[in-house]
Image (tube, grey):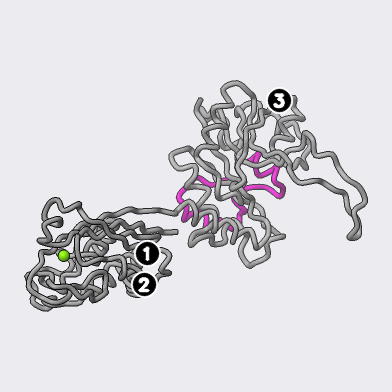
């Protein structure tokens, strides 16, 4: 069924306040209407506007129709623009509902295969009262009551006829459809499909958008350094006395290197060697906190913060347990994090392999980065 979308955006939104009608106000950096248009991307759209908004509406690059003095008149103008174009079904959407989802749109279109109309709604769950002058004057049975949303979906010919026959003053298109005897299937709506009505609704909508943009990334790191002559090793930023040292271009802090690589890995930004080439003499003997701070800074620049990290050191000696808490707090300090997001633990390799023969220390690390 060839389906088009009418987005009704001709209202002036007197409850919202502000210089600009709500559908043109900025939500998360772009006009409310752009969010709605993005949800219908790839579908044929007609945008019904107030004549005074033509200049800003043209920037959206979709076909425009000028609306009338009432919502009914605006919808009728949109329906008439589609009449005779081969469109068989239409979704009529309120331009002040920017968060409609693709899945809701899909469910509505599917329901139209069997009904004249289909519209989203949620059951009323709060108790309902009547009130007057600040006092409760009675209660209302909520059984069978629904909160209506848009888009409301109809076959084009019957809803166009219904609008032409309607005397006006309908709250929505379902009311017009019922007056004409059409059947309208209730499709489960979405709590997030809110209608921007009051100024506080913008903050709620932005919080929902942030949640949708949330991204979690995972990285791992692995490093090995060989023992050499010395009297201490640096592990996770802590100087640990030992009868050997660790060989390396920098301070050979194998635990911090693994963690740094885990963060670069989560960002798909290579490893320490890419950012601090061993061939560059300026990093010789460098304290490894420079690398870790760089990785966490790169993450922040891309909008990510560290969710948590977990470092495992693999060695027979030195014993890590007595130093693990200091390592945890030092890594947290370097990254500017709560220590509860940082884990440092150790294991031996049961005297097997190079770590078992005490030829060197290995370290593994995992890090999650969170955006949003
Ligand atoms: Mg290393």
Q: Which residue is mark 2?
A: 329
Q: Earlier in the sequence, mark 2 or mark 1?
A: 2
Q: Residue at x 73, y 41 (%)?
A: 124
Residue 228 sits above or below residue 172 on the image: below
Q: CA distance from mark 3 to mark 2?
A: 67 Å
Horizontal and vertical percent position of residue 17: 68, 65
Q: Which residues are magenta?
A: 49-77
Q: Residue at x 26, y 74 (%)?
A: 238
Q: Secondary structure at mark 1?
A: strand
Q: CA distance from mark 3 to mark 1?
A: 61 Å
Q: Secondary structure at mark 2?
A: helix
Return the mark for residue 272. Answer: none
Q: CA distance from mark 2 to mark 1?
A: 8 Å
Q: Which residue is mark 1?
A: 342
Name the foreground residue: 346 vs 304: 346
Name the foreground residue: 190 vs 7: 190
Q: Is residue 168 left or right of residue 84?
A: right
Q: Is mark 3 within 8 Å of ligand 1?
A: no
Q: Is residue 63 magenta?
A: yes
Query: Which quadrant of the figure has residue 117?
Result: top right
User: Are the two marked residues, 2 and 1, in contact with CB atoms closer than 8 angstroms?
Assistant: yes
Horizontal and vertical percent position of residue 250: 14, 73
Name the foreground residue: 272 vs 21: 272
Q: Which residue is mark 3?
A: 182
């Amino acid at each position: 069924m060839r389906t088009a979308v009418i987005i009704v955006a001709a209202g002036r939104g007197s409850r919202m306040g502000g210089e600009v009608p709500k559908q043109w106000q900025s939500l998360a950096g772009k006009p409310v209407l752009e969010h709605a248009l993005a949800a219908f991307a790839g579908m044929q759209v007609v945008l019904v506007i107030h004549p005074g908004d033509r200049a800003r509406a043209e920037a959206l690059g979709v076909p425009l129709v000028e609306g009338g003095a009432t919502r009914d008149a605006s919808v009728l103008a949109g329906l008439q623009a589609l009449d005779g174009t081969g469109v068989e079904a239409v979704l009529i959407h309120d331009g002040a509902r920017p968060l409609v989802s693709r899945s809701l749109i899909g469910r509505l279109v599917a329901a139209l295969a069997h009904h004249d109309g289909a519209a989203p709604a949620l059951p009323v769950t709060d108790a309902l009262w009547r009130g007057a002058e600040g006092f409760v004057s009675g209660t209302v049975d909520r059984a069978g009551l629904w909160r209506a949303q848009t888009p409301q979906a109809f076959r084009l010919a019957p809803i166009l006829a219904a609008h032409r026959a309607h005397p006006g003053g309908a709250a929505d298109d379902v009311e017009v459809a019922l007056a004409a005897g059409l059947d309208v299937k209730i499709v489960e709506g979405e709590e997030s499909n809110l209608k921007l009505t009051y100024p506080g609704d913008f903050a709620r909508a932005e919080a929902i958008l942030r949640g949708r943009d949330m991204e979690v990334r995972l990285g791992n790191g692995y490093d090995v350094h060989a023992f050499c002559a010395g009297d201490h090793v640096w592990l996770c930023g802590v100087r640990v006395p030992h009868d050997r040292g660790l060989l390396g271009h920098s301070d050979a802090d194998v635990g911090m290197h693994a963690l740094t690589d885990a963060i670069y890995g989560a960002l798909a930004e290579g490893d320490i060697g890419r950012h601090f080439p061993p061939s560059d003499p300026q990093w010789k003997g460098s304290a490894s906190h420079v690398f870790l701070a760089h990785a966490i800074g790169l993450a922040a620049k891309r909008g990510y913060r560290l969710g948590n990290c977990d470092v495992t050191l693999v060695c027979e000696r030195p014993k890590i347990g007595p130093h693990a808490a200091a390592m945890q707090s030092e890594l947290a300090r370097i990254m500017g994090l709560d220590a509860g997001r940082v884990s440092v633990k150790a294991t031996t390799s049961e005297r097997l392999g190079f770590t078992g023969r005490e030829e060197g220390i290995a370290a593994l690390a995992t890090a999650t980065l969170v955006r949003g």
